């Protein structure tokens, strides 16, 4: 395996994509309703176990891997506080990922309010991750996370919800608060951006898509 292109400890990669969830949406929603109505600790614990993987992957790609643990924990703190009011008007997964999205947005807004040094995403280092390596799992996860950092927020969000977390376009539209057609368009454009970044890695003179890191409100 080649030497890492960055200094410091290796980054924790997002868990690999999985289009099928161990607990389907109907079961998960029923579990959340049971936890909401009874407050049974076992039901609450089962709900968290069934959803923590999706939440972690979502916030890791939407924000960054280093912040994912804290963001996931904050998401569940908010969700469990709101759980008694969950009425099942949407699926529990959609409800929870909407809370995760607001958690990330709030974190970025707080960070933007503090003076800090701006830094451009290191797209060149991300592109280097695309070079063939002997062990694909770790490097591929890190490379995808890095490449997605250079994709406009709205496109990245739609791509992660549908292609990484595995939501339907309708569910992703509920989480993002936009029409289904907009989600489809954003996913298609995110794919185009990722392809352009990979081509930029293979062609040194090519220019990558201009990265936009600001979060939409």
Image: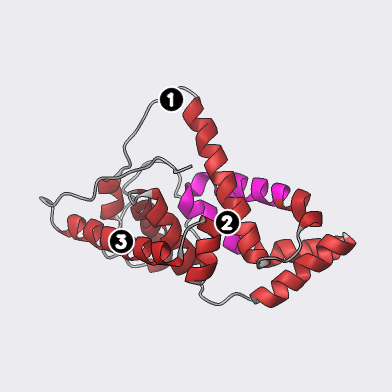
Q: Where is residue 122 shown, x and y percent of the image?
A: 31, 43
Which of the pair 107/173 is nearer the observer?
A: 173
* Magenta span: chief secondary structure: helix
Under circle 3, the secondary element is: helix
> Do the numbered discs 2 and 1 sit on residues whose CB atoms are within 8 Å?
no
* Mark sitting earlier along the chain (2/3): 2
Under circle 1, the secondary element is: loop
Residue depicted at x 42% and y 63%: 183
Residue depicted at x 70% and y 71%: 28
Q: Where is residue 147 shown, x and y percent of the image?
A: 33, 54
What residue is shown with label 3? Answer: 189
Which of the pair 182/155 is nearer the observer?
A: 182
> Do the numbered discs 3 and 1 sit on residues whose CB atoms are within 8 Å?
no
* Mark sitting earlier along the chain (2/1): 2
Q: Is residue 134 above or below residue 27?
A: above
**Foreground label between 2 and 3:** 3
Range drawn in magenta: 52-78
Residue depicted at x 23% and y 50%: 209
Q: Which mark is residue 116?
A: 1
Q: Is residue 187 above or below residue 30?
A: above
Q: Which mark is residue 56?
A: 2
């Amino acid at each position: 395996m080649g030497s890492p292109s960055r200094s410091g400890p290796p980054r924790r990669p997002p868990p690999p994509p999985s289009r099928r969830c161990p607990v389907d949406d109907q079961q998960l929603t029923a579990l959340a309703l049971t936890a909401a109505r009874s407050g049974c600790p076992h039901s609450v614990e089962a709900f968290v176990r069934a959803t923590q993987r999706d939440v972690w992957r979502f916030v890791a790609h939407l924000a960054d891997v280093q912040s994912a643990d804290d963001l996931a924990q904050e998401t569940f703190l908010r969700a469990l506080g709101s759980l008694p009011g969950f009425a099942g008007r949407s699926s529990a997964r959609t409800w929870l990922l909407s809370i995760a999205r607001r958690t990330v947005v709030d974190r970025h807004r707080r960070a933007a309010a503090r003076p800090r040094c701006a830094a451009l995403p290191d797209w060149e280092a991300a592109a280097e991750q695309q070079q063939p390596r002997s062990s694909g799992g770790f490097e591929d996860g890190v490379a995808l996370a890095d490449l997605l950092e250079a994709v406009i927020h709205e496109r990245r969000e739609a791509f992660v919800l549908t292609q990484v977390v595995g939501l339907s376009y309708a569910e992703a539209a509920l989480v993002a608060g936009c029409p289904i057609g907009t989600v489809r368009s954003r996913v298609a454009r995110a794919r185009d951006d990722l392809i352009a970044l990979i081509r930029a890695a293979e062609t040194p003179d090519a220019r990558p898509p201009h990265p936009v890191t600001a979060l939409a409100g």
